[in-house]
Image: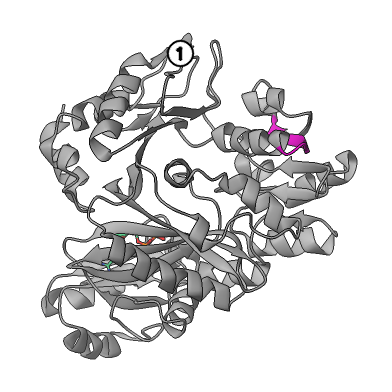
Amino acid sequence: MFDKILVANRGEIALRVIRAAREMGIQTVAVHSTADTDAMHVRMADESVCIGPPPGTDSYLSIPSIIAACEITGAQAIHPGYGFLSENANFVQIVDDHDLTFIGPTAKHIQVMGDKITAKDTMKELGVPCVPGSDGGVPDLETARALCKDIGYPVIVKATAGGGGRGMKVAQTADDIDMAFQTARSEAKAAFGNDEVYIEKYLTTPRHIEIQVFGDGKGKAVHLGERDCSLQRRHQKVLEEAPGPCISEEERARIGKICADAVAKIDYAGAGTIEFLYENGEFYFIEMNTRLQVEHPVTEAIFDVDLVREQIRVAAGLPMSFTQDDLSINGHAIEVRINAEKLPEFAPRPGRISQFHAPGGLGVRMDSALYDGYTIPPHYDSLIAKLIVHGPDRASALARLDRALGELIVDGVDTTVPLFHALLQENDVLDGSYNIHWLEHWLETNLQD
Ligand code: ADP
């Protein structure tokens, strides 16, 4: 096992990793920008190294600075958290070249899953159901037109190099395909420097269901059920829950086994998430994330596992501490993402926290790097806290969420907490009957000035 690991991240996820390491008796090194000198992750780690000025590109994304911080402190392994360098295959290769350990999958797996076409081809080959569509990139408009006739409208044109919901255009009918194809291409070129696009059948009312997988890198893998992340704004998840309100035990076992078998076959190491759109009882693969997800705590709650501990164990060459048979679901968990943003426009509101009080009590987990008097810097993501509740069933988890939100105090900046109070009044949320478009429609009618 490692003696010391470096956490190449900030905020709540850096604390999450430091906590797991401490429980394992592992020393931790925080890295930080000059904007984060007073940040909680710096205070909580055993050691810290300043790696650059505030912009992420000059600090948390600076590969030479992070490698140097490992060398200075003698850290043997790097946990990337999520975002920043967590899915950067080049970084993983450099970590390997310096005889350090990356706590996550191999550079090769990150690369394959980072390209949407190779990811889809690989998954298809491994028996994972995919959205019907083109085999690979679509070179020109003529091919696109012919293909869409076969697939059937509506279709969605997507950038191969896409991410963050950019470079995607829907064509409802044959009249729209020329425009959708050209616009997606030019958007992709502008955003990613690569204008390759592919085409898929557009699903009109799907849910976002993702399967948590975990592999030991040596041909063994398990699944830890699904998370329903359908409540989204601009393709960003807002609330996540596990298990999915509309997934039966049989469906979970079937799709879970397909996913676990797929990652076992490629000797995948560590945590991964296979994302699907789910419509009319069918799962359609859209992408795989080769890292820990923001919403991993809901899975941890219902399976009573520590996914970060498990990531560190597997990276150190130890076997996973559970088998598929050891894993069973207990109750229901819900996470809400609390951002420092002003409603209704969700405008970022960094600033000084004059008072902070975290909710507590049975079944309540608060992952946050806030403290009284902390000043949120303007340079990073606006996520300031994740509130996770766990109860014996969905109704009790919802009641607990309502209770915990009522206890939370964040004074000094605007937050998205009022959104969650409002959502808890909605029958569709209480019933769990929403698809990926529900929140956008609700926001249009309910959150105008
Ligand atoms: P990104 O990597 O940019 O987030 P994804 O492929 O994960 O792109 O898709 C993001 C979102 O776009 C999905 O969660 C879904 O809302 C929508 N989407 C993508 N593909 C389809 C599809 N074939 N049909 C309907 N919606 C889709």
At x 77%, y 56%, the residue is: 101
Which quadrant holds residue 20? top right
Residue positioned 30% across, 75% down in the render: 131
**What span is in magenta?**
24-33
Three-letter code, disc 1: His
Quadrant position of ligand 1 = bottom left
Q: Is residue 395 left or right of residue 37?
A: left
Residue holding disc 1 = 357
- State whether the magenta stretch is mostly helix, strand or loop: strand
From what the image shows, is residue 232 above or below residue 34?
A: below
Picture layout, residue 413 above or below residue 265: above
* Residue 386 at least partly seen: yes
Q: In the rendered view, would you say 189 is above or below 360?
A: below
In this view, the residue farthest toward the front is: 325
| Left or right of residue 226, residue 119 in this image | right
Residue 92 in the image: state x and y as whole percent. Answer: 70, 61
Q: Using the image as rendered, state which of residue 398 and residue 139 is in the foreground.
A: 398
Please state the horizontal and vertical placement of residue 304, each as a whole percent of the image: 50, 43
Choose between 409 and 64: the one closer to the eye: 409
